Amino acid sequence: MSGRPLTCEEVIERLFDYLDRELDGQQAAAIEWHLARCQDCFTRAEFEKRLRARVEATGTAAAPPRLRRRIRDLLDRFDDEQDATP
Amino acid sequence: MILAHPTTCAPRPRSVVPPRVAPGVAMTEHQPAERRQWFEQRLEPLMDRLYGTALRLTRDPDDAEDIVAEAVGKAWARLDELRDPQRFEGWLFHILTNAFISEWRRRQSRPQRPMDDESTSPDELDIGRFTLFQQLHQPFLLWWGNLEEQFFHQLLQEDLQRALDALPDAFRVAIVLVEVQGYTYEEVSRLLGIPLGTVRSRLSRARGLLQKMLWQQAREAGVISGPRASAHQGKEDQQP
């Protein structure tokens, strides 16, 4: 990347790479420099970050008691098999 | 520990934490009881995330339970392979992901439902360019209220889950691996055995499609209504 500041179009083009931590330090710093100075791009980035956090939160759901019992039984079975091994 | 009441933020027990194991010390050097305790103490705080991630990947509660049980069983059986105990969490989630991918590939070899592959109609080829932000961010409408705030306020987790579950398999898996599990594009490329460019393309289309579905849900739920809907209708018509 050259030392030239990024345009809004370039920042939006690379926004998801930035949010996905796919950029190197210098590229990420260039995006952050722009976001610190451009209200429109900052607002867009915050929106995508917020939506992304909500998507990430869908990856947590209360594990059913049945699954916990199943895992306990599974581990018990492994232990029993190990104990039975001469 | 596995039978403990399910909580999403269970505090880590202080008094029963086993002595730290230096990286490189195989778990075989522990007594069996200590080893089981060590495993369960680290597994318990991850259970809701393991199950939730499995649920997002599979879309089915029974399938999700199956792959979590399979992953935990494999992790327990292969615990000796974990050379750095500090990496337990990443190691376990990697086993879970591989368990899902194996099963997914096995099922993919069967005839597919139309939406299970990543093919899209010509109208959807540009779906990656759709942005919810453009629909909601209307400075000239601010006197009616902030639509972005209203959207997030009214967006239920169930709405988001429904939209994610409705994505074609290839898109859903890409977005879950990156946004829920935090894999890099390179890692997703290796895990799925697809080129890096395909990972990027699937992610872009997955995000566009997801945002379009959320936009449609928001409109149907009345988040956008009255004059706002009319004002947005024209804008939406210009979107792919």
Image (cartoon, coloured by chain):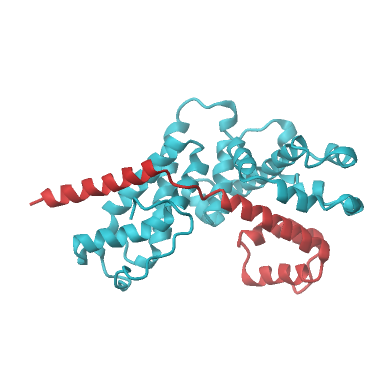
Chain colours: A red, B cyan
For the point 80% across and 58% down, which residue is it? A9
Residue at x 32%, y 61% (from the top left corner): B82
Q: Is residue B43 above or below residue B29?
A: above
Q: Can residue B126 be seen in this view?
A: no
Instruction: Mark yes or no: residue B87 visible.
Output: yes
A2 lies left or right of A24: right
Name the residue: 87% across, 42% down.
Answer: B228
Q: Where is residue A77 in the image (x, y as percent from the top left)?
A: 22, 45
Question: Residue lying farthest front?
Answer: B5
Residue B107 drawn above or below residue B53: above
> What residue is at 75 percent from the left and 72 percent from the top?
A33
Task: Locate the N terminus of chain A and report the quarter of the image it occupies.
Answer: bottom right
Would you say B188 lies left or right of B74 here?
Answer: right
Q: Which residue lies furthest to the left in this view?
A: A86
Residue B96, percent across and down?
Answer: 41, 48
| Quarter of the image where one finds residue A7 | bottom right
Q: Nearer the viewer, residue B103 or B55?
A: B55
Expressed as whole percent of the image width and height from the top left, the position of residue B159 reads 64, 41
Depicted A32 relative to depicted A11: above or below: below
Instruction: Report which quarter residue B45 is drawn in.
Output: bottom left
Residue B216 location, x and y as percent? 74, 37
The front one of A32 and B42 is B42
Q: Number of marks in the image?
A: 0
Quarter-wise, where is residue B118 in the image?
top right
Nearer-the-camera pick, B152 or A46: B152
Could you tell whether B105 is left or right of B222 in the image?
A: left
Q: Nearer the viewer, residue B180 or A32?
A: B180
